[in-house]
Image (cartoon, rainbow, N blue to C red):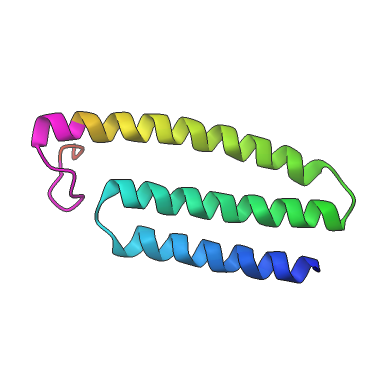
Amino acid sequence: MTVNHYIFLSAILFSIGAVGVLIRRNPLIMFMGIELMLNAANLAFVAFSRQLQSIDGQVFVFLILAVAAAEVAVGLAIIVALFRTRQTVNVDDVNALKG
């Protein structure tokens, strides 16, 4: 398999994640879409890293995974807090973060 196959798969995964974020109004589905987009970027980094025989892309993957783990922890905490106060997790119904 060439790097083009991996990049094509990465583009498909990124597109599916972007559609999930843009169309769905459930924050859990939106977080899954964001995670899918981050993993698609990771796949592209690893593919290019292997193609160029460099370790730099894999270092970026570890950085992205750490950011994604922190994002999920904070995001789920916000979702739980909003559900406890508003009794809904629909993004359109929640306007508690407006200043």
Identified at 18% across, 44% down, the residue is 89
Extreme residue toward the right, this view: 53
Counting from the top left corner in percent of width and height, residue 47 is at 76, 57
Q: Quadrant of residue 73?
A: top left
Image height of 42 relative to 21, above or below: above
Residues rendered magenta in the picture: 82-95
Magenta-drawn stretch contains 49: no
Counting from the top left corner in percent of width and height, residue 31 is at 38, 47
Counting from the top left corner in percent of width and height, residue 22 is at 34, 62
Identified at 80% across, 42% down, the residue is 56
Image height of 19 relative to 76, above or below: below
In the rendered image, which quarter contains the N terminus? bottom right
Number of numbered callouts drawn? 0
Side of 58 relative to 95 (left or right): right
Magenta-drawn stretch contains 92: yes
Q: Quadrant of residue 66?
A: top right
Side of 28 relative to 35 (left or right): left
Identified at 53% across, 62% down, the residue is 14
Counting from the top left corner in percent of width and height, residue 45 is at 71, 52
Identified at 9% across, 37% down, the residue is 87
The dominant secondary structure in magenta is: loop
In the rendered image, which quarter contains the C terminus? top left
